[in-house]
Amino acid sequence: MLKQLLGTAGTRVLNALINLIILVLMTNSLGSEGLGIIALIVLDIVIIQLFIDLVAGSAIVYYTSRYSLGSLLFPAYVWIAVIAMLVAGISLLFSSQFPVFYETIVPLGYSKDILLLAIVNAVMLLHYNVLLGQKRINTYNRIFTVQVLSLLTVFVIQVYYFENKDVNAYLNALYMAYSMGALGAVFSTYFQRPSLSVRDWKQAFTHVFRYGMTTQMANILFMGNKRLSVYLIKYFSGLRSLGVYTAGTQLTEGLKLIGQSISMVQFSTISNSTDEEYSRQLTIKLMKFTVLVTAFAMLILMLIPTSVYAAVFSKEFSQMKIVIYVLGPAMISLAITTIYSAYFSGKGKPEVNLRSNLIGIVFTAIFAISLIPVWGYVGAAITAFISFTASSCYQYIIFRKQTHTKASEWLIRKSDFSDFLTITKNIWQQDK
């Protein structure tokens, strides 16, 4: 498991570096307005995926070891098609009846691209979940690496070879990246010739939907905690301010990949374990490591002078340093809640995450509406910190109550560092 953990972390670090390069290219070639449009497009794709994940999301990871693959994939494929048709219908309705509201959410002229990209992305993520459920994490890492490299390669070709310096350059790169990820994941899923019996698909659908309903309600609320501010900034401050905020959040949220890569392996491991004490100890150790690494990386970002940000990302984005300062503590809180969420999901208790995110969305709604109209993207960053902190505090209380974990166990000890060094050394020797 720990070997897979380091492999996944390495993959995510590569992804973070590639995203940083792409961010630099976008800020210098597309400007703040173009980056604002891309932020809305990507967010719309994510929102569509939230509803697709009711049947094709993390519940697939949990039930892959409990049902035949055919009984899981058949309803998932149908569900993706149904959601796609519903989105198309709702899009037509709102664009004609509520044009002002619709254009606040969906950038003008990009509705078809959003729907097509959402479909390809859904197929890709569905089969990624299958690979994680089968604990084929190394395979997942390889395909994910191809995906992010495809994104970078196509975007660079678009900008420098074809001199295409508009939003379509990034969209073309997204099409290629999602397609490569989907093809690789689908091929890897069927290459092992798994059981494709659909005999139990109704029972599987019921269990997956029931699990997915709670999980996705939590994810929808979590996404609301993170992204409600995007639409409010667009409405009150415009695309340019949204572009600056997006650049700052993308740079800082690159650090969330540390927690995501760790929590992904944690979730896969706990889902396949019945040892309560092992799951508890694993969560505590991974929490300490995640917070330490995230805090160290965030400190580096904060120490970089404003002049460097202006030189790298262009003068138009020099104010993103303010966003980074305010979002720094929020990223620590986000790292904490990511590890807790993986624990509760792995133990089949997604309702804890649901309540946690419900608390977070309440704080987001209160402070976003009051702070963003006055302080713009700075108010959005402050809101994120308050929301994530509230969520993580609730999860801590429940974790302590259910596992009887003492407060002293969260203290960082010398043994935590020595354990990690020993593990790393053993893995290195095994790979020789």
Image (spheres, grey):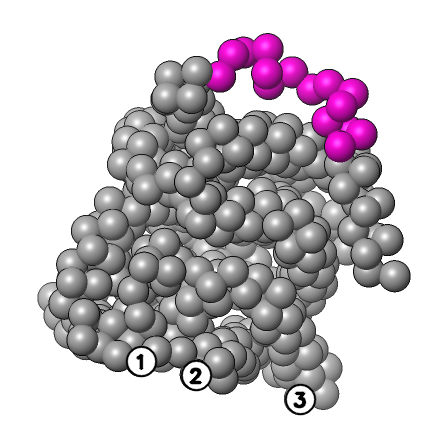
Q: Is residue 174 toward the left or the right of residue 362 in the image?
A: right
* Residue 80 in view, yes or no: no
Displayed quadrant of residue 48: bottom left
Residue 400, numbered circle: none
Mark 3 against mark 1, which lies toward the viewer? 1
Pick the residue in front: 366 or 192: 192
At a point 68% along the width and 79% down the height, the residue shown is 153
The magenta stretch is 405-419
Label 2 or label 3, whichever lies nearer to me, is: 2
Query: How many C-alpha atoms fall within 10 Å of the one at disc 3: few (<14), some, or many (≥20)?
Result: few
At numbered mark 3, what does the secondary structure look like: helix, strand or loop?
loop
Left or right: 43, with 74 as reference point:
right
* The disc label shown at residue 162, or none: 3
User: Which structural element holds mark 2?
Assistant: loop
Q: Secondary structure at mark 1?
A: loop
Q: Magenta residues: mostly which secondary structure?
A: helix
Please give the residue where the numbered disc 1 appears in the rendered image: 196
Of residues 86 and 239, the one nearer the viewer is 86
What residue is rendered at 60% in x and 18% in y? 410
Q: Nearer the viewer, residue 194 or 133?
A: 194
Q: Amino acid at mark 2?
A: Arg
